[in-house]
Image (cartoon, rainbow, N blue to C red):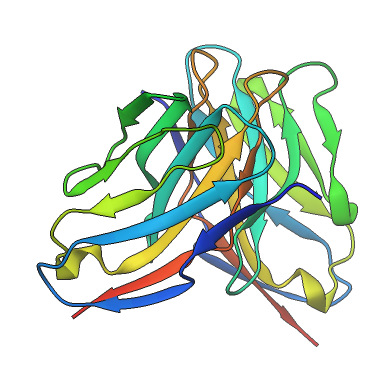
Amino acid sequence: AQSVTQPDIHITVSEGASLELRCNYSYGATPYLFWYVQSPGQGLQLLLKYFSGDTLVQGIKGFEAEFKRSQSSFNLRKPSVHWSDAAEYFCAVGDTGGFKTIFGAGTRLFVKA
Amino acid sequence: DAEITQSPRHKITETGRQVTLACHQTWNHNNMFWYRQDLGHGLRLIHYSYGVQDTNKGEVSDGYSVSRSNTEDLPLTLESAASSQTSVYFCASSVDSGGYEQYFGPGTRLTVT
């Protein structure tokens, strides 16, 4: 069965510092992978997605993620965090046999001045 | 602009009452989903639909039902509300090709007293 693990429940980084959020997935075939962001009181918004091609994908708001098949990982990165990046981030894997998506439990990002 | 809306945004109800949460999308997407979000659990799929007259159970469907009479709407009904159903509910929709990322509504916060 598909699953997504986000090992860090919360992370605190200083404004201007780099960020990496971890995501590991379990899926038998080549997965569709997503990162979503949720600001307080709002729904989820897609940051980026991967389903084929270049394993380094660029997203909105300066985020990027790298698909590593050998490690079953899809980590999210940003070189310099801004205070407005404070939010909850969800990694997700899509079912290529249908249209469902399995979400990780999320990582809450805190940004300190 | 296309969008997905949910109503009400906040709802307080009593145990045992029937409650219906509305979801309306103007993306003209075939796929629609209902999730609940609880601390430590991420998003869990309640029900989903791949088109008019199609509905399917997700991982936490007990006590919930949906119906799909048109493309735009997927109302979620709690047949007899229980305190365990206090949660934030999100509706989402997606295309059925090209990576099928999901577009989320703003959520409904439901409290069952």
For the point 81% across and 78% down, the residue is A83
Position of residue B107 measured from the top left corner of the image (x, y, whole percent)? 51, 63
Q: Does the rendering let one see residue B43?
A: no
Above-or-below relation of A35 to B70? below
Quadrant of the rendered image containing residue B89: bottom left
For the point 17% across and 44% down, the residue is B62
User: Left of B81 or right of it: where is A112?
Assistant: right
Q: Does the rendering let one see residue B56?
A: yes
Task: Give the number of callouts.
Answer: 0
> Front-most of A76 and A71?
A76
> Front-most of A14 and B100?
B100
Quadrant of the rendered image containing residue A17: bottom right
Above-or-below relation of A98 to B32? above
Task: Point out the residue furthest to the front here.
Answer: B69
> Front-most of A86 and B10?
B10
Position of residue A89 measured from the top left corner of the image (x, y, whole percent)? 62, 57
User: Left of B44 or right of it: where is B62?
Assistant: left
For the point 50% across and 36% down, the residue is B32
Task: Point out the residue furthest to the left here.
Answer: B16
User: Left of B71 or right of it: where is B68?
Assistant: left
> Front-most of B91 and A74?
B91
For the point 42% across and 26% down, the residue is A2
Position of residue A9 measured from the top left corner of the image (x, y, whole percent)? 49, 63
In which quadrant will I find the C terminus of chain B? Answer: bottom left
Above-or-below relation of A60 to B18? above
Quadrant of the rendered image containing residue B48: top left
